[in-house]
Amino acid sequence: MLCKEFVYFPEQVECACRAGADMVLLIARALTDSELGALYGRIEFLGMLPLVEVHRAEELARTRSLGCSVIMVNSRDLESLKIDRDEAARTLEATPTWITKILASGIESRTDIEFFRGAGAETFLVGSALMRSTAPGEKIRELCDVR
């Protein structure tokens, strides 16, 4: 279970742990380097997986010292709220190969999955497409059946 909140404080990490979260999302853009490091360490200490979210390739440099095993690339720019597929693809391609890459936002179809998989995404976080679908089960089957 992913705690997908805007996490800023250690108390939020503690609450996520008590609620049974397996992973806690940390948005690199929303945190200073010291906050990111402290929260990352606390999440690991509590036995959960820290999931660091980035949008731009330049943000990856901030994650290097953390030793991330998983990075989530959000194709939505949190400043403009616009989806930028090309920026997300560049960020995926710039992420080291030993890191598991999750792509979030902008997944509407098999074509989107294929595009981002070609850029290196291994896993996908799909939300809006399922929420808007009149047949979410069919949408899940459509999105899962991509090689």
Image (tube, rainbow, N blue to C red):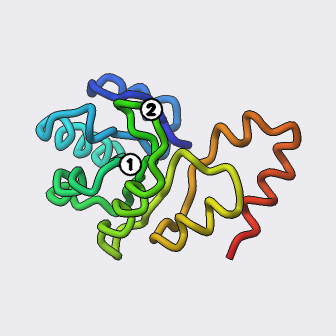
Residue under label 1, please give it. 51
> Residue 49's spot in the image, x, y percent?
39, 50
* Vertical placement of residue 104 versus 92, above or below: above
Closest to the observer, 8 or 113: 113
* Vertical placement of residue 113 versus 72, above or below: below
Of label 2 and label 1, which has the lower sequence position?
1
The structure residue drawn at horizontal position 21% and vertical position 54%, both measured from the top left corner, is 58
What amino acid type should be assigned to the residue bearing mark 1? Leu
Residue 88, picture quadrant = bottom left
* Vertical placement of residue 15 versus 136, above or below: above
> Residue 92's spot in the image, x, y percent?
39, 64
- Would residue 35 be found to the left or right of residue 20 on screen? left
Element assignment for label 2: loop
Element assignment for label 1: strand
Residue under label 2, please give it. 81
The structure residue drawn at horizontal position 62% and vertical position 59%, both measured from the top left corner, is 112
- Would residue 47 be found to the left or right of residue 103 on screen? left
The structure residue drawn at horizontal position 64% and vertical position 40%, both measured from the top left corner, is 127
> Residue 145's spot in the image, x, y percent?
76, 68
> Residue 42's spot in the image, x, y percent?
26, 40
Disc 2 and disc 1 in contact, CB within 8 angstroms: no
Quadrant location of the C terminus in the rendered image: bottom right
What amino acid type should be assigned to the residue bearing mark 2? Leu
- Would residue 72 be found to the left or right of residue 8 on screen? right
Closest to the observer, 105 or 81: 81
Label number found at residue 95 = none
Closest to the observer, 30 or 129: 129
Quadrant location of the N terminus in the rendered image: top right
Please state which of the two labelled residues, at mark 2 or mark 1, is closer to the viewer.
2
